[in-house]
Image: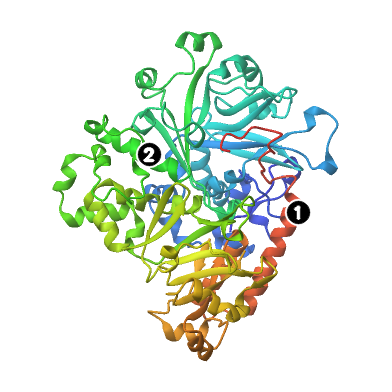
Amino acid sequence: MYPQTLDSPNNDANSIGDSSTSRPRKRPRLIDTEAQDSDEQCSSEDRVRNGNPATRSAFPQFMQLPPNLRHHIWKLYCPDLSGKPRVLEFTPKSPKESEAPTEPSERLTLTTDRTLACQTKSLRAMLSTHHETRSIAVRIFPDELALDVGSGHAIVRFRKETDVIFLLGIRLGVNYIPPNFATQVQNLSIGTVRYNNNNENNYYGEALLQVVPAIKSIFPNLKRLYSLWPIIVFGTKDLGNWCATDYVHKYMLEPDYRETGMGQSMKSLFCWPDLDAHPDFARSEVPKLCSLEEMEEAGLEIWSMVMFQRESCFKAYDLMRWLYLNPHSANAGDDDEQMAGDGTTNAGNDRATGRAFPQFVQLPPELRHHIWKLYCPDLSGKPRILQFTVEEDDTPIEPSERLTLTTNVVMANQTKSLRAMLSTHHESRSIAVRIFPDELALDMGSRRAVVRFRKETDVVFLLDLWLDVNYIPPNFATQVQNLAIGAVQENYEENTYYDETLRPVVPAVKGILPNLKRLYSLWPVVSLFCWPDLDAHPEFARSNVPKWCSLEETEETGLEIWSMAQFERVSCFRAYDRMKALYLNPHLNPHLANEGDDQNSSSSHDDHGADSDEFESERMDNDEIVELDG
């Protein structure tokens, strides 16, 4: 939508308004798209006459709006214009083996992190759209971070007094940070520091004080150094509640996984002390990595920065925030393990309610139920996919003892809020049991695990079902009415059945799961699960969903056999988005959509191949840098 040009002396002749005469470029992953002053002054009519596609979606009357209204609209489009401090992550990158240099100083290159392009997308659009938007953006972010990435010169607009530069790791002894970059940094956050010729000693936390002189030699204008505290590694035991208060800086980073290529959404919350507005609070409440006297000797301030990532960490933050807003409950409860019970033996257990404020039970019942549903979305009663795992043990002699059906990490995270509901309070338990009245029982070693579910709607997912081994407990098997399987194994992997070939083994499957009503053959689109709604839309399913057998064969087997699609990875979600677009816009030509998709895929592949050395941000391998997030 927005034209971009490389910020280098070689493109002085290029301009935003002359896109009809300039050579087409491959899509650069730049941060600041510089525009010539003369081009910024050209009118919208000139741009339309020149064929600039960026103006076709804009209406000319926008410039007739009052200036304050236009500025308000720009701020709604680009929240960074609020001027709040940001965290900008940069990553060291190793060259390809075919281009491996001999000099140590050439082995690493500082480049933008994969999240930075998505993070600064709206700001870059502001910088390249119009002279008014650029002047607003430059006024708020007057400083520049310059990087030499391949053949291009990338510029990141920022405000050095407030923005924090985040480097997960720093290598000392390797000159890979450009001087024009290093001299601009005043606030720096670091995960670990190590010397290039020493892979054993990693400096972080209090140990950072030992390498402060070396860090200052790289960043001569550094004023504040933050040691990253990733909650997923260090936990919250010694943290306190300071980062949940209103006296600290907070910055939420939630990049679009489809643009970053991560495969999943990975949001991060950074918290660090507000030393300008609340210095007294920071000195009295924030854990110190060194004394104030040592800070004066070092010539800079050294503090902690906390990073919350993943669902469990955000739940810990929510609890810290709640305790901050409800100080009368600060002494109740010990840790999050109280919320981890599965509710199998504590029907009326109120042990976790010490954290809750007594006035909660005085709220209207419908409001309490609404709060519980906000905490546990599963209470909506929508069908779920519950995946169980088969563990294999080679030690037993009997084949029937080699396999054990068990839960997995995905299941633990998926049902965490529901398990908390079952063990928190008798009211929350009664709500959960009413919606999930059935139980799946497993014998896991010395304890008995119970998974609450609704057998009429929930689907049990087994990637493989073994016919020769009696490893599924009877109390489990009799409860399953909806089953999704990837494949059925017989004679110890000699025979594998899936899709259309499932029909011959249906009697054997029903022999294991006697109450089975619906069998889904998993169709991995290599995790979004999609399967037909046979209760609400049976006619649609029979006419549009691919069948593995005829309706007559379904009646003969005594159960329904259907497909279940699983979307995973970025390319699969793109395919799903295209399918959804064609469904919502039936007038579109699907052949044109396919051609566009193929062209985008080809273009994306070509650009990636050509620009990966220049603009793609990759984290270093484990032997190159220690990643604190594991």
Q: Looking at the rendering, which quadrant does residue 55 occupy?
A: bottom right
Residue at left 37%, top 66%? 382
Q: Residue 165 falls in which quadrant of the image?
A: top right
Q: Name the side, left or right, on which 328 lies relative to 264.
A: left
Tags 1 and 2 touching, CB below 8 Å: no
Left or right for 481, reference 50 = left
Q: Nearer the viewer, residue 41 or 287?
A: 287
| Quarter of the C terminus within the rendering | top right
Residue 305: x and y in percent read 48, 29
Secondary element at image label 2: helix
Q: Amino acid at mark 2?
A: Glu
Above or below, comparing residue 256 to residue 213 in the picture? below
Q: Which residue is mark 1?
A: 609
**Tag 1: amino acid:** Gly
Marks 1/2: CA distance?
Answer: 47 Å
**What mark, if any, has residue 233 been given in the picture?**
none
Q: Residue at x 67, y 32 (%)?
A: 625
Q: Nearer the viewer, residue 313 or 178?
A: 313
Looking at the rendering, which quadrant does residue 91 occupy? top right
Work out whether residue 25 can be spotted: no
Across and down, in percent, residue 209 comes to 56, 15
Q: Position of residue 592 (x, y in %)?
A: 64, 77
Give residue 208's position: percent from left, percent from top.
57, 19
Q: Which residue is mark 2?
A: 337
**What is the secondary structure assignment of the residue under circle 1?**
helix
Work out whether residue 405 or residue 122 is closer to the camera in this orientation and state it: 405
Q: Residues within 10 Å of mark 2 (few under 14, many from 20)?
A: few
Extreme residue toward the front, this view: 397
* Residue 66 seen in the current view: yes
